[in-house]
Amino acid sequence: MGSRVKTPVSLLFVSAVIVTLVAVVGSGLLFGYKYLVQQQITQKQNELVEKEKSFDYASMNEIVRIDKKIKAAEGLINSHTAVSNLFSLLQENTLRNLRFTSFDFSYLAKDKIVVTMSGEARSFGVVAKQAEAFSMITGNKAFSDSIFSDLNVNERGNVVFSFLTTVNPLTVSYVENYNSTNNTQ
């Protein structure tokens, strides 16, 4: 029988075979992974379509409409002016021997409210005491830049005067007064 001669396998040939096998296996794995990802995407898209079909758009539209109404109501409440709070403050801090005969409330700007009043007192001392009483409530920043002016004596011997002050917007804010009332109860 003939003897076979073994030829040496070159290192280059072995490397080429290994690289080819790795490339073929890698390509197969990559193709399989791509197929798996595409299947998952298709499955998730189908789930999304099913969930979208189950949405109740009429209810969603109703919820959006109600949300808009709630936000509009919040805006109205937040900007609501409660002048009654100012009247209560004046009532609590006006002396017995003094009365106001006119009242004017004006918004000069969103954050600047001016109150002008005329009044009558039994004496100049009462007007001075009233100025002191109003300066005491500026501690809570209700009034600022308060001025008593036009002091005169009328035909009955009473002192007539004008009063001008800037009112802190929080003093007439419905929300602030509502919150402070509920926090004290």
Image: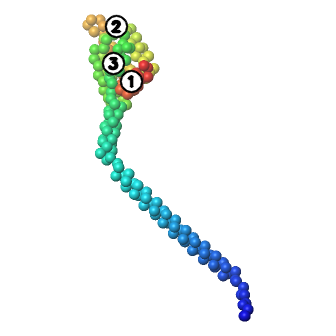
Marks 1, 3: nearer the viewer: 1
Residue drawn 29% across the image and 5% down it: 157
x and y percent of residue 124 in the render?
Answer: 36, 9
x and y percent of residue 143 in the render?
Answer: 40, 22
The residue beneath circle 1 is: 177
x and y percent of residue 184 in the render?
Answer: 43, 20
Spatial CA distance of label 1 from label 2 is 29 Å
Residue 181 versus residue 19 in the image, above or below: above
Could you tell me the amino acid type at mark 3?
A: Phe
Q: Is residue 144 visible?
A: no
Query: Badge 1: few (under 14), some or many (20 or more) residues near its Cα, within 10 Å?
Result: some
Near-viewer residue (26 or 86): 26
Query: Badge 2: few (under 14), some or many (20 or more) residues near its Cα, within 10 Å?
Result: few
Q: Earlier in the sequence, mark 2 or mark 3?
A: 3
Relative to 154, is 140 on the left or the right?
right
Quadrant of the rendered image containing residue 76? top left
Task: Tell which residue pokes out farthest to the left in this image.
Answer: 155
Q: Is residue 120 visible?
A: yes
The residue beneath circle 2 is: 97
Could you tell me the amino acid type at mark 1?
A: Asn
x and y percent of residue 6 in the render?
Answer: 72, 87
Quarter of the N terminus within the rendering? bottom right
Considering the numbered disc 3 on the image, is that residue within a helix, a strand or a loop?
helix
Q: Do the CB atoms of the residues marked 1 and 3 lie less than 8 Å apart?
A: no
Considering the numbered disc 1 on the image, is that residue within a helix, a strand or a loop?
helix
The residue beneath circle 3 is: 87
Relative to 88, is 23 on the left or the right?
right
Q: Earlier in the sequence, mark 1 or mark 3?
A: 3
Quadrant of the rendered image containing residue 169? top left
Considering the numbered disc 2 on the image, is that residue within a helix, a strand or a loop?
loop
Quarter of the C terminus within the rendering? top left
